[in-house]
Image (cartoon, coloured by chain):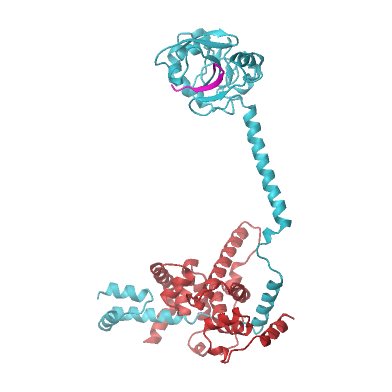
Amino acid sequence: MALDRFELEQREVERPAVSYSELSDHDLIDATREGDEAAFAEIVSRYKGQLTNYIYRMLGDYEESIDLAQESFVRVYFAIDRYHSGYAFSTYIYRIATNLAISELRKRKRRRLYSLTGLFSYDDESDEEYQPPDDRPHPEDEVVSREMRETIGKAIVSLPDRYKAPIILREIEDKTYEEIAEILGLGLGTTKSRISRGRGILRQRLERYLDSSTDEVQ
Amino acid sequence: MKCSDTTKILESGARPDERALEHIRGCVECALVAAREESLTSLLKRAPGIEPPSDFDRTLMNKIESRRSKPVSYAFLRPGILVPASAAVLLVLVLAIAFVLFRGGTAPEIAGPGVDEAPVAGSSETNVESVDSGEDVPDRDQLADTTNGPTSDPPNEPGAGSDPVEPAQDDDEVFEGGSRDLAADTPEDIVPPWADGTPRNVPEKVPARRLSPRELLAELGIEAELDNGGWKVVSVRQGSIGSRAGVRTGDLVRSLDGRPLTDAPLDVGGKRLQIVRGTRQMTLTIRP
């Protein structure tokens, strides 16, 4: 069993004196390079939540988001020797995830094109509307209805591709402009401009909720 | 700070600096914009999220294991793929070269712009004989099919069976270059191809005419005598089209655009004159 072997290898490698959770990303990468797969497991546990959510907000597809998040980690693992600590690991892995998500969006566009010709019956809406069951308690549900949350999700997913990633990274992932520019390989000015335009589109689409929110704020 | 500047900062999602904050405190409109943008920011944070499944790590490690045991990179460099792919590319290249060579061999003459020279293995006598025997140059019957100049009655429809090497407008270019006036001197030789009433499919400004080779050469300013299947140039008028093309006294003019200049009348037109000068076979380009 693959996992058994993975656990066996963990035992063979010399463990660090401190807990993995106390190590920096770069330390964990160094440990992974030396064969410590538990260090890699710590990286996975640190980033899997935010990465899966990031891709989910890009695609609006639960299964695909899980799959692409895992694929991002697989790529990190096999290219770990090529990674250099010149910039943050989070930037590195977000960049990989972004590229995978954009590639998937392009594939979908092509499939949509085929479906227009009648070759395939691809229901594009079904992906966007799918909401996986989430049993976690939502304290804000008292104020913000589930419908509103779905509308917000749809408004983001349906943004033009060039605005989608900058908006998610800025507004949801709380990345700085510099980090976003680095993740997306864009200039700082272009990044700011795309965020501003993306916000403009969202402002129009979520106008009715904005009014009520404004009332709440006041 | 102006309202427009403050609004721009707020709508971009950037955090307002001290100056902007000071302006917002004193401006009701900008305060409303700030509230709206703040509500948009907080609204976007409520976008639905997901929780990775409990078997996320296990599935990931399985993927890594399977990828490790089955490397897929550079699969195209395996001999099983590389060899047939290379053979296919080679085959396509060979076919392309064969096609180009085949096309080049069947065309009467393909010459580039300007004076193209090609050394001839034998003497000029050999070349003239080859014109007579038709070894190198197609005979007139063949040419009647491959050129737009009909050589037998009734004349063919213009454009039908035009030379694939030479576009039809080339004849027009030469015609406009100076043959029109001289042609008017020999109306009896002018036989329009639509004389039999067949529908024509060419613009009216391109009338096809037939001239004897002597007259045709005279149009180019070349005086020549029939000599063993070709036309031996006796003199070339200074400044004439023939002179500009590079025709010299003593040249043996063999063909025009691949059509042999025998004593039978030819259509006016053409762009390239094939001659033999000494032991060299040359193609001269006519520039009206």
Q: Does residue A185 show up?
A: yes
What span is in magenta? B276-288
Q: Which quadrant would the N terminus of chain B be assigned to in this image?
A: bottom left
Residue A36 placement: quadrant: bottom right
Residue placed most toward the observer, B46 or B124:
B124
Q: Is residue B212 among what the camera can see?
A: no
In this rendering, the answer to whether B91 lies above or below A30 is above
Where does residue A109 sit, x and y in percent of width and height? Answer: 57, 62
Q: Residue at x 36, y 79 (%)?
A: B15
Disc tally is 0
Q: Is residue B70 magenta?
A: no
Q: Dividing the picture into quarters, in which one does residue B11 lie?
A: bottom left
Q: In this view, does B104 lie to the left or right of B5?
A: right
Q: Chain A is drawn in which colour?
A: red
Query: Percent from the top left, x then y, of residue B216?
Result: 50, 13
| B49 or A133: nearer the viewer | B49
- In the image, A195 versus A16, the foreground residue is A16
Say whether residue B287 is magenta: yes
Residue A141, image x and y in percent?
51, 87
**Where is residue B6 drawn, in percent x and y?**
30, 75
Q: In which quarter of the image is residue B72?
A: bottom right
Majority secondary structure of the magenta segment? strand
Q: In this view, does A193 lie above or below B199?
A: below
* Residue name at image x 64 percent, y 81 percent: B56
- A21 to B247, vertically: above or below: below
Chain B in the picture: what colour? cyan
Query: Which quadrant would the C terminus of chain B be assigned to in this image?
Result: top left
Which residue lies at the image location 34% right of the left edge and 78% below the top edge?
A: B33
